[in-house]
Amino acid sequence: MKRRTFVKSSILTGVAASILPAMSNATEAPAPTAEYYELRIYSFKNEIQQKLTEDYWKDAAIPAMNRLGVKHIGVFTEMNPAGPTKLYVLVQYNGIAHLATIADALEKDQAYQNKGSLYLNAPATAPAYERIESSLMKAFTHMPHLEALEKRNRIFELRQYQSASEAAGKKKIEMFNDEGEIDIFKRLGFAPVFWGETVIGTLRPNLTYMITFDDMEAKAAHWKAFGSDPQWKKISSVPEYADALLVSKITSTMLVPTAYSQI
């Protein structure tokens, strides 16, 4: 086995072993499989790099990963970029075991290797990107499956809530899962795409989610309705759920999907 393939397999196997719950009895019914989401953020220094990476996802990666059972891959650009251009890629996996099979399968997929060759084999003198920032998220129990919305003109908001401690992060997740915060978003028409707890990545502990709007005016109206919602006021008034205790930083990024995005 080639060293590169062995290293990739070893890393993914280690990730799976650290996240998959142990089965105490082989005869017990398996627990429901949670979806996992990979978020990649590419940074570029010029349009040539961006086109090379976009062509890779459009022509090679998305078709190949779809063949391997990845249902939806979202590819987005920033609505109002500040600084170097970035590309956001969101990949939906059926579970951690599914994720662990992808890298080896792509190594053996000749059609993928051929169509993605310019990106995969870009020389050091002309790289396909500057850097990739990547994180792995586990779906929330109260929204265990990604919702790929019908394709039409809309904007996406990617929000990340950082917490000062693991305990605070778990408490914030509890608000979404157990206290009905996700239900408020759905009832008010935010059309959420996913909620995920970051298990591997930067700026942990954090949770990340994606919601959608028709335009910026609709965004403002929805958040105004959320802030004045009676159920939200009831939840947020509980002392143990105060944002000052649970959230140390909120980041919001407005995104627009590419023409070939599956989300």
Image: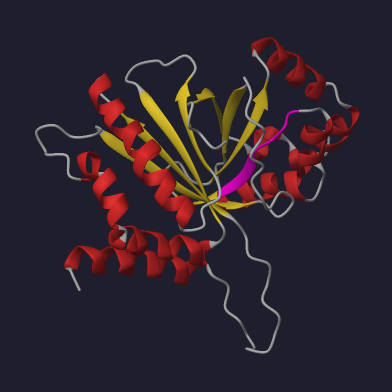
Extreme residue in the top direction:
217
Q: Is residue 263 above or below residue 224?
A: below
Q: Of 88 and 250, which appears nearest the observer?
A: 88
Left or right of residue 96, residue 5 in this image: left
Residue at left 55%, top 50%?
71
Q: Of 189 and 66, which appears nearest the observer?
A: 66
Left or right of residue 69, residue 13 in this image: left
**Applied colour scheme:** secondary structure
Q: Is residue 144 above or below residue 163?
A: below
| Number of on-image labels | 0
Q: Position of residue 83 (x, y in %)?
A: 34, 16
Q: Of 30 and 103, which appears nearest the observer?
A: 103
Which corner quadrant of the image does residue 57 belong to?
top left
* Image quadrant containing the C terminus: top right
Which corner quadrant of the image does residue 87 belong to?
top left
* Image quadrant containing the N terminus: bottom left
Q: Is residue 250 above or below residue 202?
A: above
Left or right of residue 64, residue 184 in this image: right
Q: Position of residue 68 (x, y in %)?
A: 46, 58
The residue range painted magenta reads 190-197
| Magenta span contains residue 263 | no
Q: Position of residue 74 (x, y in %)?
A: 51, 37
Residue at left 83%, top 37%?
235
